[in-house]
Image: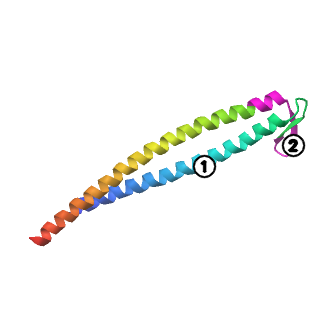
Amino acid sequence: MAEDQKLLQALSDEFQKLQTELQSNVDARQKLESQQQENKGVQKEFAKLAEDANIYKLVGPVLLKQDRSEAVLAVEGRLEFIEKEIKRVEKRIAEIQESSEKKKMEVYQLQSHMQQRQQAQTAA
């Protein structure tokens, strides 16, 4: 019975760890999605600008003039990177959810087994 308790505690700890990791990855995805929206907004603003419009980039406390094509390429590059990261994080979230579900079932099965054994001992 004590071994079952230790096993149950270990499984519960693993499940909790998976839940913490899942929350961390969900937070990361939300941050990436926020960055993606911000960069898409910049991309829309670039589309509205005239070809000869000046574009400035904030570098520390200084605004530096930036070539339009360079700025557009930088935003497109960031968007590609963010999209790849979102896919990677979503894949990891799915893996964690699957592992978490398996752990949860192991915990339920062990609890059920322990209850059945306890009921059998009480009946005897």
Q: Residue at x 63, y 38 (%)?
A: 82
The quarter of the rendered structure image containing the N terminus is bottom left
Q: Residue at x 39, y 54 (%)?
A: 15
Query: Counting other residues with Cα less than 10 Å from the Cα at mark 1, is it few (<14), some (14-19), or many (20 or more)?
Result: few
Query: Is residue 67 in the magenta section?
Result: yes
Residue 53 is situated, as x and y percent measured from the top left of the image, at 90, 33
**Quadrant in the rendering for residue 86:** top right
The amino acid at mark 1 is Gln
Residue 122 is situated, as x and y percent measured from the top left of the image, at 14, 72
- Say left or right for 47 vs 76: right
Does residue 104 lie above or below 70 as drawn? below
Instruction: Report the front residue among 92 and 14.
Output: 92
Point out the residue furthest to the left here.
Answer: 124
* Residue 30, label in figure: 1
Residue 19 is situated, as x and y percent measured from the top left of the image, at 45, 54
Q: Which residue is mark 2?
A: 62
Q: How is the image coloured?
A: rainbow
Q: Which residues are magenta?
A: 58-73
Does residue 43 lie above or below 103 as drawn? above
- Say left or right for 100 vs 117: right
Question: Element under label 2?
Answer: strand
Question: Element under label 1?
Answer: helix
Query: Is residue 62 in the magenta section?
Result: yes
Residue 124 is situated, as x and y percent measured from the top left of the image, at 8, 70
